[in-house]
Image (tube, grey):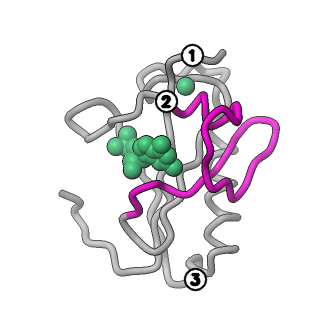
Amino acid sequence: MTDPNCLFCKIAGDEIEADVVYQNDDIVAFRDINPQASTHVLVIPRRHIATLNDLQDEDAKTVGSLFLAARDIAAREGIAADGFRTVMNCNAAAGQTVFHIHLHVLGGRNLDWPPG
Ligand code: 5GP
Ligand code: ZN
C-alpha cells in the first residue's frame, strides 16, 4: 500500500512537506519542486504504484481520479481554456525519476510538441 522508502508515499503521508493544492481519500496533488511551467502540479494516488506498467485493472477508478483532479486543478489555476498538458512518464527512457506514478499537469505557457 505504501513504500517506506518512497518520496511520494512520504508526501502523501505528510512525512515530507509539499505545497498541496488538492486532495481526497484516493489522491494528492502538489506543486512540482522544479516547475517546468507557471503551473506544474503532480497528481498522485495515495496507494504506492511504481510505474504505469504496474497498474492493475482494479486501479481504473484511481487513474480516473487523477484525471478528474487534473481537470479541476486546471480550472482553478486558470489554464483550462488556453490549454494544458497531462503527462505520465513510464520508466527510464521516458524520464521517470520518481517511481510512484504521478500525472504531471503543466500549463501557463505554450508547450512544444513533440516533447523532447
Ligand atoms: P518524473 O521525472 O518522474 O516524471 O517526475 C518527477 C517529478 O518530481 C520531477 O518533475 C521533480 O521535479 C519532482 N520532484 C522530485 N522531488 C520532489 C519533491 O521532493 N517535492 C516535489 N514537490 N516535487 C519533487
Ligand atoms: Zn510510493
The answer for how far apart the CA atoms under marks 2 and 3 are is 29 Å
Vertically, is 40 above or below 93?
below
The answer for how far apart the CA atoms under marks 1 and 2 are is 9 Å
Which one is closest to the eye, mark 1 or mark 2?
A: 1
Q: For mark 1, what is the residue?
A: 3
Whether disc 1's CB lies below 8 Å from ligand 2 is answered: yes
Q: Residue at 47% of width from left, 23% of height from top?
A: 50
Q: Residue at 59% of width from left, 40% of height from top?
A: 44
Chain-order first, disc 3 or disc 1 = 1
Badge 3 local density, few (<14 within 10 Å), some, or many (20+)? few
| Mark 1 touches mark 2? (CB < 8 Å) | yes
Q: Secondary structure at mark 1?
A: loop
Work out which quarter of the rendered image holds the N terminus and state it.
top right
Whether disc 2's CB lies below 8 Å from ligand 2 is answered: yes
The percent coordinates of residue 2 (x first, y second) are: 63, 18
Looking at the rendering, the stretch of residues picked out in magenta corresponds to: 7-35
Q: Secondary structure at mark 3?
A: loop
Q: Residue at 67% of width from left, 74% of height from top?
A: 75
Q: For mark 3, what is the residue?
A: 81
Q: Amino acid at mark 3?
A: Ala
The answer for how far apart the CA atoms under marks 3 and 1 are is 37 Å
Q: For mark 2, what is the residue?
A: 100
Q: In the rendering, which numbered label is found on residue 87?
A: none
Residue 109 in the figure: left or right of residue 65: left
Q: Amino acid at mark 1?
A: Asp
Q: Nearer the viewer, residue 13 or 81?
A: 13
- Considering every residue shown, the one lying at the far right of the view is 25
